[in-house]
Amino acid sequence: MKRYISYAVILGLVWCFVHGTISFNNFVLGLIFAPFIIRPFKPLYNFKQDFSFGRAIKKIPAQARYFYVLIKEIIKANIIVAKIVLQPKINIKPGIIAVPIRTVTDLGITAIANTITLTPGTLTIDISDDRSVLYVHCIDASDPEAVARSIRNDLERYVLEAFE
């Protein structure tokens, strides 16, 4: 029930930002809309799972670090992809790389897969049946071990801190 209420409060705040006016009336209107938005997605989320506001608040600094690293990696990858595209002779070796992951929760796996996909030059295409390996298409897979190491050490570390 705590989780359901917390999602409703978050959606109430989102409604205020979407509407463009932050006021008590808009927040209440968002709270009224929230159950109609949450209900169809209820089977996807485990509302019976224990939820702690204190733990969620403690995760905010780690999530801020994650978003900072994500933005930084997106900018770096954009520059690298732009250099590749602007070269007169494109010398790349695209390929699919198997990246072992340490994340185990659905949220963590989704976060690392989306992080990889958001970074230009990489695309998460599949996950293994045992959910321990992501298959990633890279624009330049000339050194697959370095790419997998970069994903595990740079991106996944922050996902683990923020979402696990």
Image (tube, rainbow, N blue to C red):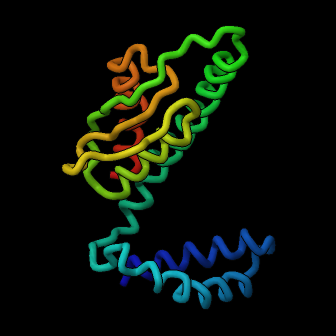
Where is residue 19 shown, x and y percent of the image? 77, 75
Residue drawn at x 55%, y 41% as measured from the top left = 118
**Residue 81, how many percent across, how many down?**
63, 23
Tell me if 60 is positioned left or right of 163 in this view: right
Comparing 128 with 43, the one in front is 128
**What is the residue that sits farthest to the right in this orientation?**
21
Q: Is residue 91 above or below residue 127?
A: above
The correct choice, above or below, for 111 with respect to 24 in the image is above
Quarter of the image for residue 49 reads bottom left
Residue 87 sits in quarter: top right
Residue appearing at x 61%, y 90% in the figure: 32
If the image is split into quadrants, where does the N terminus sit? bottom left
Q: Residue at x 33, y 58 (%)?
A: 106
Residue 55 as seen in the image, left or right of residue 77: left
Residue furthest to the front in view is 89
Residue 149: % across, % down: 34, 23
Q: Nearer the viewer, residue 11 or 40?
A: 40
Q: Residue at point 71% right, 74% down?
A: 16
Q: Nearer the viewer, residue 7 or 107?
A: 107
Residue 28: image x %, image y %? 66, 87
146 lies left or right of 114: left
* Quarter of the image where one finds residue 78: top right
